[in-house]
Image: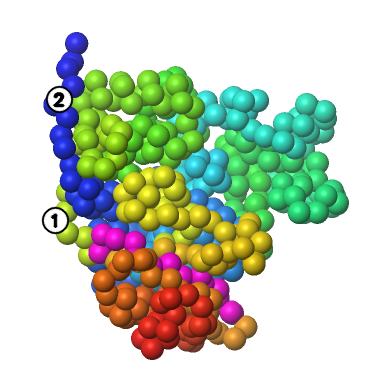
Amino acid sequence: MHHLPPVEHLPAPLARRIALAAQGLADERPVTAAGTRQLRALVERLAVVQIDSVNVLSRSHYLPAFSRLGAYPRELLDRLHAPRHDVFEYWAHEASYLPVRLHPHLRWRMAAAEQHAWGSMLRVQRERPQYVSELLDRVRETGPLRASDLGEQRPSTPGQMWNWHPGKAALEYLFFVGALTARSRTAGFERVYDLTERVLPAAVVATPTPPRADAVRELVRTAARALGVATETDLRDYFRLPVADARTAVAELAEAGELLPVEVAGWGRPGWLDPAARRPRRARARALLSPFDSLVWERPRIERLFGFRYRLEIYTPAAQRVHGYYVLPFLLGDELVARVDLKADRAAGVLRVQAAHVEEHHPAPALVADELAAELRLMAGWLSLDRVEVQPRGDLAPELARAV
């Protein structure tokens, strides 16, 4: 039996830099505009780019590449999805873009829809299986289909995020089980569904489905590479894996020497290190991060790594919000130093800073404001907005207004 190596002790700042490097956030951005190759490599590194429909600033899936690569042309990311199909859409962390090589490793989830899907998707399949199979036949015979092509009314239950009409629920069920996939998205961000075998590269479709244990192990391995250093919960959460499966996979990877046991100062729980992880001496990034960025989506992890307490307040009533509606953490070096509530006012050509807060005990708010102002100008240019305007809300707002 293979014995685990002795546990290495990692100082907290080193763990932070390892995590940033694994996420592609330890270095300054490339000087030249990123092209398709860099984008493809980034999606391969992150493995999961979460999709979210909120468009107050920019659709979330465009932001991680901007944070890491700078002002790249957004249509290049669209093209990775369609027509290139280097990435595909599926339920990973949440709805996400993933490299197509992972498709075979998620088929166990597609096959186990009864345990993993939810709500109206399962209901329509249970109550109207005939309707679901007729929809699949319709796509097979007449080609790609959007939910809006079905001409059905949404049910009138206000305030429900998932109040899909039966046709949308049926299409989503077929998407969950992998019979259909998203061929592309419309300008209004609606999924265009088509048969999976007509969309994905033939080589991917032809790849045999691995046993579930092998597939989960590959997903944990992929998560370990994307995280650098992580707890078992972090590794599991990246693809939202079932507890028992993930635990087994972690044990097997550790046994094989593909995960190294570490203790990170202050974590108070065992950590796992990707043996190939870079260990930068310093981190030089400057980036605004989407609320759905893979660096920050797991709240306990960023509290552990950065001492940064982060809550998404989109669904909090306006009067009760502390930091704002669409709040982006600001990364400087190896610390999360501030948070800004941003809105792209496209009609006025303005990037609006609705609120700006510096982390308490930060020794140099003026420096933070200068760096943040530069980052906001870069973002405004990328979003084709003419200028940045700062509202007088939050303790960093006066400094930031001066710097902008």
Read off the residue under disc 2: 5
Q: Is residue 115 left or right of residue 350?
A: right
Q: Quadrant of residue 264?
A: top left
Q: Is residue 41 left or right of residue 319?
A: left
Q: Amino acid at mark 2?
A: Pro
Whether residue 72 is visible here, answered yes or no, is: no
Q: Is residue 353 left or right of residue 140?
A: left
For the point 63% across and 57% down, the residue is 315
Residue 23 x, y percent position in the rendering: 32, 51
Q: Main secondary structure of the magenta part?
A: strand
Read off the residue under disc 1: 281
- Mark 1, residues whose alpha carbon is within 10 Å: few (<14), some, or many (≥20)? few
Residue 135 x, y percent position in the rendering: 77, 38
Along the viewing direction, whichever of 56 and 175 lies nearer the viewer = 56
SS at mark 2 in the image: loop
Residue 292 x, y percent position in the rendering: 48, 54
Residue 340 drawn in magenta: yes
Q: Which residues are magenta?
A: 333-346
Along the viewing direction, whichever of 134 and 61 lies nearer the viewer = 61
